[in-house]
Structures are given as structure tokens and as C-alpha cells.
Image: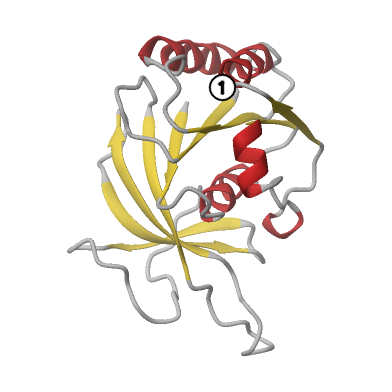
């Protein structure tokens, strides 16, 4: 189970980053939002990130219902992933709740992502925790006035399996993969067109 914290509550980059992580998987995806997340950010836009599979979208009124739907979804091994969006720091989303999600995801072998909008990175059992910021897209190869592939500043600030760090990350539409550039040494956002210097399939 991984958590993603957008740099600003309505930054769509967090959704794009998660979708790009799922692009190479097969099977349907369960996507659950609480009412505030849906009202403030709308539904995830899927066509441009290689998502050619069924997505079951659920909107609930409370964070508790999001967590319940995610846990139920993680019982289904036919799903490729379960994604939840929760606004703020609801008391129900405590360490115990995150641990239940992590254990269910690992037992089922189903990817689980939780997007935390307008939230604080309090204690959690998430295996990876990211801060995501949208960056300017790359240059479009055919039209300099059009946006190219999406890019993000991705900070892995906690992980049980990898060394934390901060990278410039781009989604390569043609290859349907994420490209991680060299880490930001000083934490500053890199300038330029975002051409990746080091490629890593995810």
C-alpha cells in the first residue's frame, strides 16, 4: 500500500502519477473517492495515461466509507489495483486503518494506492509515501505549442523497501512507462524540458 500527498490539495499530478504506475498492469481498477475529493477535483481523466481497462468508480460521503470500499475491493484478486482519495485528516484514517489496507493488499497481491489531499503525513503503515508536484510537460515532438508528456517532481519521503529521494519523473506515452531522471540533489525543481537522463521501467 502506497500513499500519495499532492503538493497542493487540487493538484491533478497525484492522479496522473498513480495512473502511470498502473498503466502496465492488466485487469480492472477500483477507484473510490470521498465526496469532497470528487467535488474539488472531479473524476480522474484516464485516456491519456494508457488506461485501456475497466475502471469502477465509486463516490462515497465519508472517509470511513472509502476505507470500507477499499478493504472490500482488496478481497477481489481479479482487480489490478484499488485506489482511494480522501480529503483532510479524518480520525478514522489512523495507523490501524492504514495497516489493515496494507495487510489486505499484500495478502491479495493487489496494488493499493491512497491519495491524501489537504492532509498531514501522520503515522501510517503505508509501505511507500510520496509527495507529488506537477511540473511543466515535455516539448511535444510535432507541435511546440501543445503539451507533451506529463512530468512530476516525486519525493519518496518514506519507504520500507527503497532509499528515499526526490526525482524528476516523466510518463513516456510511446513506451507506456515512467522515466525517473537523476535525483534532485538540493531539493530544487529542475529546469529545462524534462528530458530524462536515466530511464527506469516501473
User: By what rule are the colours in the image chosen?
Assistant: secondary structure
Does 193 appear above or below 163? below
Looking at the image, which is closer to me, 202 or 86? 86
Q: Residue furthest left?
A: 186
Which residue is pictured at 57% across the width and 17% down the height? 67
Which residue is pictured at 67% across the width and 23% down the height? 61
Q: Position of residue 91 (x, y in %)?
A: 42, 16
Q: Position of residue 23 (x, y in %)?
A: 65, 47
Q: Based on the displayed image, in which of its 4 quarters is residue 84 positioned?
A: top right
Does 105 appear above or below 49? above
Q: Position of residue 163 (x, y in %)?
A: 25, 41
Residue 140 seen anywhere in this rendered image of the structure: yes
Q: Based on the displayed image, in which of its 4 quarters is residue 146 positioned?
A: bottom right
* Residue receiving disc 1: 63
For the residue labelled by badge 1, is the local secondary structure a helix, a strand or a loop?
Answer: helix
Q: Seen in the image, is 127 located left or right of residue 113?
A: left
Q: Seen in the image, is 129 located left or right of residue 36?
A: left
Amino acid at each position: 500500500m502506497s500513499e500519495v500527498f499532492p503538493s497542493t490539495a487540487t493538484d491533478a499530478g497525484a492522479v496522473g502519477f498513480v495512473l502511470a504506475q498502473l498503466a502496465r498492469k492488466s485487469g480492472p481498477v477500483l477507484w473510490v473517492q470521498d465526496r469532497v475529493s470528487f467535488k474539488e477535483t472531479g473524476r480522474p481523466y484516464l485516456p491519456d495515461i494508457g488506461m485501456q481497462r475497466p475502471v469502477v468508480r465509486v463516490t462515497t460521503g465519508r472517509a470511513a466509507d472509502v476505507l470500507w470500499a477499499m478493504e472490500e475491493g482488496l478481497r477481489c484478486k481479479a482487480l489490478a489495483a484499488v485506489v482511494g482519495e480522501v480529503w483532510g485528516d479524518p480520525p478514522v484514517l489512523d495507523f490501524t486503518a492504514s495497516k489493515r489496507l496494507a495487510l489486505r493488499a499484500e495478502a491479495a497481491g493487489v496494488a493499493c494506492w491512497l491519495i491524501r489531499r489537504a492532509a498531514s503525513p501522520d503515522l501510517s503503515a503505508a509501505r511507500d509515501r510520496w509527495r507529488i508536484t506537477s511540473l511543466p510537460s515535455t516539448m511535444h515532438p510535432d507541435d511546440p505549442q501543445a503539451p507533451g508528456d506529463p512530468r512530476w517532481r516525486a519525493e519518496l519521503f518514506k519507504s520500507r523497501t527503497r532509499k528515499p529521494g526526490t526525482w524528476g519523473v516523466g510518463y513516456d506515452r510511446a513506451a507506456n512507462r515512467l522515466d525517473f531522471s537523476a535525483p534532485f540533489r538540493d531539493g530544487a525543481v529542475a529546469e529545462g524540458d524534462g528530458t530524462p537522463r536515466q530511464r527506469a521501467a516501473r
